[in-house]
Image (cartoon, helix red, strand yellow):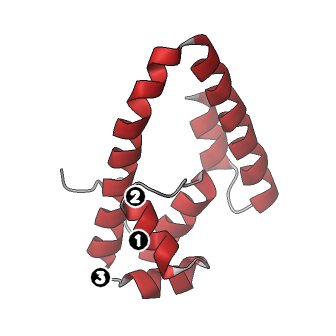
Amino acid sequence: MKRWSEIKNAGKSPERLAQLDAQVRADLAKIEQRYPEAVEALPYARASIARELLGARREAGLTPERLAARVGKSANFVLESEAGRAEVTERYFFALWRACRLPAGWKAPS
């Protein structure tokens, strides 16, 4: 939870977000090495994140192309992330959140 609060407090600093992203990835690599069975949870986590991304875009009424233009990614990347096939960083997630202009506390429908 410490990393999450650091990410939220990093604001719009791309450098700090990139640094935190690298730290989170290093932490995850350590966990995967120490607890190989935890790796089995990754597909579930990716699917859950993908549902959030798709729900956010739909709630905002954006096409993949329009969202891609707002976040500086390709429409293909947007679609791949919504399918759980693209690796999504915190930086992308927060860019998407800002682009969709969703209220704080919004949750994707289950």
Residue 106 seen in render: no
Q: How far across and down, in percent of the image, does residue 18 sit?
A: 75, 52
Give the Cα distance between marks 2 and 3.
Answer: 17 Å
Q: How far across and down, in percent of the image, does residue 30 sit?
A: 67, 21
Identify the residue at image location x=30%, y=55%. 51
Checking the image for residue 79, the label placed there is 1
Taking the view exactly as shown, the residue that stands out farthest to the left is: 110
Relative horizontal placement of residue 58, taking residue 69 as reference (left or right): left
Sequence-first disc among 2 and 3: 3
- Please name the amino acid that badge 3 sits on: Gly
Sequence-first disc among 2 and 1: 1
Q: How far across and down, in percent of the image, does residue 79 sit?
A: 41, 71
Camera-near label (2 vs 3) is 3
User: Where is mark 2, residue-wise?
Assistant: 104
Q: Secondary structure at mark 1?
A: helix
Identify the residue at image location x=27%, y=72%. 59
Residue 13 seen in render: yes
